[in-house]
Amino acid sequence: MEQIFFYIFAIVAVASAIAVISVRNPVHSAMYLIVCFLQVAAIFILLRSPFLAAVQVFIYVGAVMVLFLFAVMVLDIGKESFGEHMHSQAIPAGITVLGLLAVVGWLISKGKITVPLGKYTEEVLTKNTEVVGKSLYTQFIFPFEVVSLLLLIALVGAIVLVMKEKGKGAGSTRP
Amino acid sequence: MEMNLFRLIPEFIMLGTAFLLLILELFLPKGSRKAFGVIGILGTVSAAISLPYQDYGLALAGLFVQDQMSIYFKWLFVISSVFVLYIVMLYEDKINNWRGEFYSIIVFAISGMMMLASTNDFVSFYVSLEFVAICLYVLAAFLSDSRVTSEAGLKYLITGALASGFLIYGISFIYGATGVTGFAEVAKALQGVEPTGFVLIGIVLVVIGLTFKISSIPFHVWSPDVYQGAPTPVTALLAAASKAAGFVVILRILFGALGPMKGEWMAFVAVISGITLLFGNLAAMPQKDLKRLIGYAGIGSAGYLLMAVAAASELGAGAIMFYLLTYVFGIIGTFTAIVVFHNSEGSDLVESYAGLYKRSPLLAFSLFIGLLSIAGFPPLGGFIAKFYIFMAAIKEGLWVLAVIGALMAIVAMYYFLLVIKSMYLRQPTNPAPIPVDMTTTGLLYFVNAATILLGVYPGPVTDLVMNIAQGVF
């Protein structure tokens, strides 16, 4: 039963991901991306990871995609300019993807893709959010703190790059 | 859960300096920008003073490690930081629309590289790498009025994001295969195990992702454009410190975490190295812009360093560390001269360097020493470094690679000697001398002396790096 659902979610996710890069209209593209993110959230739930699923929905589907749509709206990207560029790269990209698919498929058919079960069994994961929180604030405190620095610098950088100083025109154009 | 926060003192000092600079930007009057550079250099020097007092061990629940190798690379970053901050002070003179955050972001980037040198876990590695990357994206696009610079920043961002995708995907495969993320734990889990498809895909993706940072094939495309378009001090930072940061993580991940799988990645890295060597050096030949030329030469250098990685021996690891030290000095000397020259002439084209010897013997000599050291000319530091790399490659039987490397070293001599010929033998179009101030003169003498000294008396440093390399696997 679970497997059937997994395949449904996976197929819809892959199909919508392909749609993201093949439709011409950027707004439609963003909508397909939302569909893709929702499928991934559903797969997280199948993996007994409701916390990740919630985060996926809140952050990606909520915040990031709304920003995306705002940017598309404000920048007014025309349909034509969006589609033109893609198709010269379609053939090499297709070959690469099919090659990767062949390699992974070959490895699966040979039974080479098998991994041991991790330490997070179903019993541990009944308290999923608690497990995530604990490891985030104890074992993984270092990356957690570095992420805060990263967000700060992203914020500062974004402001610095778009800020124009008052009363000054274009400055030197020296590289 | 041992936190041992005292092992992070150098990082804390750097971060504190960066925050101080960020806040001071709000209070100091516009004319006092030089003060930012001085504060940044003082902060970096105090971080450097704390380095010899560090003891070795783990910190932050084992995700941070302080050992001989991390201290060595932190020295490299501190040296690059001091000189890059000084170059920024020279450079900003000629820019109207300048903002003090530049200094702060450079110090942030250096502190991130210091954390990168000490990471002991895939999660903290990835996050630190992204931290450094975001600082560098901002720096590369800093002069947002200039089209060339904005283009450089955008290209760097897009390639970087793609490479990060490869890296994190590969890390997830390795995590899937082993169930752990710590470098030491991964190495233990892979010890004596038959490589499964999972691990192989992970290794291939991680190696490809790492090539972005060191600008080798297949993620080399950004390098010439960004080197040419970014503000010159940022180019120096990318060439010196960022490349060193890329190789310290390669040493930690390929030699450390994936060391037991070296039979699987050696051939792959050797192929990448060979193609990178050929591409970087051959494409450098027709270049007209000195910064772009150094960008292509930097791809070639990544090829040499990868040759030592492909050797996968302790000798190779030591050779990488020594090469990076000579490379940092070569790059700093070259770029200081480029900035001084640009301030006076407003051009980076090779032909504008004609007759530089008649106009400023010191600048010409610094470029002479810096470029020839990067090319690997005997008796300079770069020659000894390349010699060790060839030795490491031949010892492991990588004959084909060594032959390609030797041929490409001749090509590198050729295109750098063209620049030097133009500086020394041709007549200047404008014979006015180029003034070089006292501090810059002293600094250039110091860097040139260091490069020559590393070539004629490398003993102490090579002993040190070979000693550090003992513990790399």
Image (spheres, coloured by chain):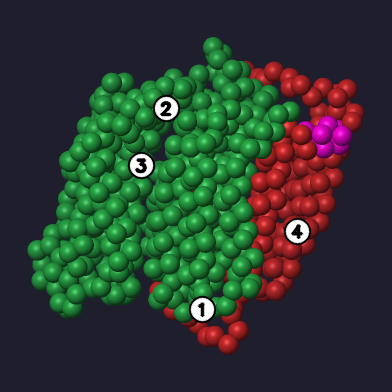
Chain colours: A red, B green
Q: Which residues are magenta?
A: A128-135
User: Residue B111 appears at what percent x and percent y?
Assistant: 55, 49
Q: CA distance from mark 1 to mark 3?
A: 35 Å
Q: Are marks 2 and 4 in contact (CB under 8 Å)?
A: no
Image-based side of A54 in relation to B456, left or right: right
Task: Residue type at mark 1: give it.
Answer: Gly
Task: Tell me if residue B36 comes above or below residue A116 in the rendering.
Answer: below
- For residue B31, the mark is 1
**Relative vertical location of residue A58 with respect to residue A47 in this rendering, above or below:** below
Which type of secondary structure does the marked residue at label 4 adopt?
helix
Q: Amino acid at mark 2?
A: Ile
Question: In this rendering, does residue B38 appear at all?
Answer: yes
Q: Chain of mark 3?
A: B
- Badge 4: how crowded within 10 Å, few (<14), some, or many (20+)? some
Q: Residue at x 77, y 62 (%)?
A: A66
Q: Is residue A148 left or right of residue B311?
A: right
The residue that label 2 is drawn on is: B468
* Helix, strand or loop for the magenta stretch, by majority: helix
Vertically, is A140 above or below B362? above
What amino acid type should be assigned to the residue bearing mark 3? Leu
Where, quadrant-wise, is the N terminus of chain B in this rendering? Answer: top right
| One can see residue A46 in this view | no
How much space separates mark 4 and mark 3, taking CA atoms? 45 Å
Mark 4 belongs to which amino acid?
Met
Number of the front mark, 2 or 4: 2
- Please name which of the two marks, 1 or 3, marks the residue nearer to the observer: 1
Q: Nearer the viewer, residue A148 or B333?
A: B333
Residue A5 horizontal side relative to residue A75, left or right: right
Please give the residue where the numbered disc 4 appears in the rendered image: A65
| Residue at figure coordinates x 47%, y 30% from the top left | B68
Q: Are marks 2 and 3 on the same chain?
A: yes
Q: Which residue is mark 3?
A: B325
